[in-house]
Amino acid sequence: MTTKEMRLSKLFPASGKTVIVAMDHGQTFGPMPGLVDFTAAAERLKEADGVLMAPQMIRFSGSLYRGKGSPTAIVRLNWNTIHCEPWHYQQAYIVKTMSVAAAFAAGADMVLASLVLQTGDEAHDAANVQGFAALAEETARLGIPLIGEVFPVAGLRDRPAEFHDYIAKMCRIICELGADAIKTFYTGDRFAEVVEGVPIPVFALGAEKFESEVAALELAERATRAGAAGVVFGRNVLQAQNPARFLRALKEVVQGNASPAEVGARYGLH
């Protein structure tokens, strides 16, 4: 087992599926609902298998990462304009915000970096690849697992067939550039093709906040049944009526193969 494999394996419980909570939205959304009090939000996530945040926010995470059985600390290493949804940025310019070594010194167990292609400019795409590949080289040198985040250009999600094709191709591309696992969108009935196209774990993200908490659980069920190695949920946990309760329900669906409807009824989810 390599150092990367050893560290990545700690993200997965005995069930083999992982539940990660993303709370790095403040980098591009500011103090959004559910994350205004960052420390309080972090301390509600002790039951997560991993928590994703900006490396500079580990210092404000309270007791989240303290003690045996605490979540794996995952930090984001680059900043992507396409994530700035409140400002309607469109062009997916990506910059490195911290070195892998500095993130490890800050307390990271593993790191995440995003990649966007098909920006409409080949030189721009090549620069995005160059930045991701450089981070992959750093993680290889230090033995730190790298989660590659596959994100689409603006508007692509409105075209389901093209969106699926992009995600499937991009997951293979980011794997071949050095990712050890992938965070990306669930693409629907053909998502199994995305998973089958790469020899590394694929995590399905939750994207926007669902009006129904049970609907969010249903997405998690569909993704894991299609082969996802787990989920990365952000707003659907952080903005739930009771984040800690919803997180427990999510783990029962992802790791215990429980029915979303039954779990929702038992936990009083809407």
Image (cartoon, helix red, strand yellow):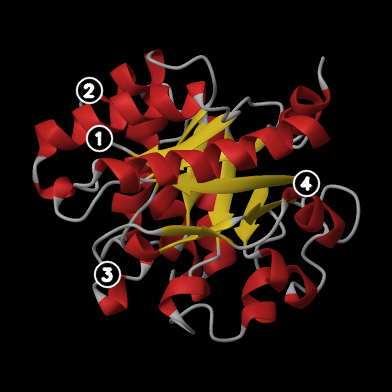
Q: Which label's residue is closer to the chain start, 3 or 1?
A: 3
Q: Nearer the viewer, residue 263 or 20?
A: 20
Q: Distance from label 2 to label 4 (Cα)?
A: 32 Å
Q: On the picture, is 129 further left or further right than 213?
A: right
Q: Distance from label 1 to label 2 (Cα)?
A: 7 Å
Foreground disc of the pair 4, 3:
3
Where is residue 112 shown, x and y percent of the image?
59, 47
Describe the element under mark 1 as helix, strand or loop. loop
Q: On the picture, is 257 further left or further right than 106?
A: left
> Where residue 109 is drawn, which disc sits there?
4
- The amino acid on which the numbered mark 4 sits, given as a three-letter code, is Asp
* Residue that protrudes farthest toward the right in the picture: 67
| Mark 3 neighbour density, 10 Å: few (under 14) some (14–19) many (20 or more) | some
Q: Residue at x 66, y 47 (%)?
A: 111
Q: Which label's residue is closer to the chain start, 1 or 4?
A: 4
Badge 1 vs badge 2, beta-carbon distance below 8 Å = yes
Asked if residue 261 can be seen in this view, the reply is no
Foreground disc of the pair 3, 2:
3
Where is residue 14 shown, x and y percent of the image?
71, 26
- The amino acid on which the numbered mark 2 sits, given as a three-letter code, is Arg
Q: Which label's residue is closer to the chain start, 3 or 2?
A: 3
**Would you name the residue on which mark 1 appears?**
187
Foreground disc of the pair 1, 4:
4
> Where residue 89 is drawn, which disc sits there?
3
Q: Distance from label 3 to label 1 (Cα)?
A: 23 Å
Q: Which label's residue is closer to the chain start, 4 or 3?
A: 3
| Mark 2 neighbour density, 10 Å: few (under 14) some (14–19) many (20 or more) | some
**Would you name the residue on which mark 2 appears?**
190
Describe the element under mark 3 as helix, strand or loop. loop
Q: Residue at x 45, y 39 (%)?
A: 129
- The amino acid on which the numbered mark 3 sits, given as a three-letter code, is Tyr
Badge 2 vs badge 4, beta-carbon distance below 8 Å = no
